[in-house]
């Protein structure tokens, strides 16, 4: 879990320090991002956490299993950190060795 959080902090830091031309493709106002995720992918907020006092991270998930992780700064600018398919909200611990 620590490795995941470290990766997310690095990704968020990187996302907010990307050159403006590259950032324009991955970043937009949070309201626009949330609207697009809902309309295009049917994703809704599933989790939220604070990376630091200036950035929060949110996970958006659809019933089909698509997911998107956004980082949003205090100015309302959101950037996509990652996206994918196959999201599972419940973990089956019996299937994992060593647990």
Image (tube, rainbow, N blue to C red):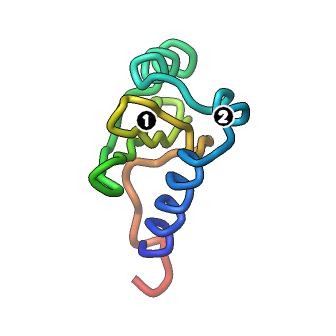
Q: Which residue is mark 1?
A: 60
Give the residue drawn at x 52%, y 38%.
68
Mark 2 surroundings within 10 Å by alpha-carbon count, few (fewer than 14), some (14 through 19), many (20 or more)? few
Q: Residue furthest bottom?
A: 98
Tell me: residue 13, above or below residue 84. Answer: below
Mark before the other along the chain sequence, 2 or 1: 2
Residue 18: % across, % down: 64, 45
Q: Secondary structure at mark 2?
A: helix
Tell me: residue 24, above or below residue 55. Answer: above
Residue 45: % across, % down: 35, 33
Report the Cα–Cα distance between label 2 and label 1.
24 Å
Looking at the image, which is closer to me, 53 or 60?
A: 53
Residue 30: quadrant of the picture: top left
Looking at the image, which is closer to me, 52 or 5?
A: 52
Q: Which residue is mark 2?
A: 20
Q: Residue furthest right?
A: 21
Give the residue drawn at x 53%, y 24%.
28
Horizontal side of 98 relative to 45 (left or right) equals: right
């Amino acid at each position: 879990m620590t490795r995941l959080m470290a990766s997310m902090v690095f990704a968020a830091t990187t996302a907010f320090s990307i050159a403006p031309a590259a950032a324009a493709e991955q970043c937009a106002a949070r309201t626009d991002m949330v609207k697009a995720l809902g309309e295009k992918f049917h994703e809704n907020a599933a989790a939220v956490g604070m990376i630091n006092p200036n950035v929060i991270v949110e996970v958006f998930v659809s019933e089909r299993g698509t997911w998107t992780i956004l980082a949003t700064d205090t100015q309302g600018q959101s950037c996509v950190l990652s996206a994918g398919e196959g999201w599972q909200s419940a973990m089956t611990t019996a299937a994992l060795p060593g647990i």
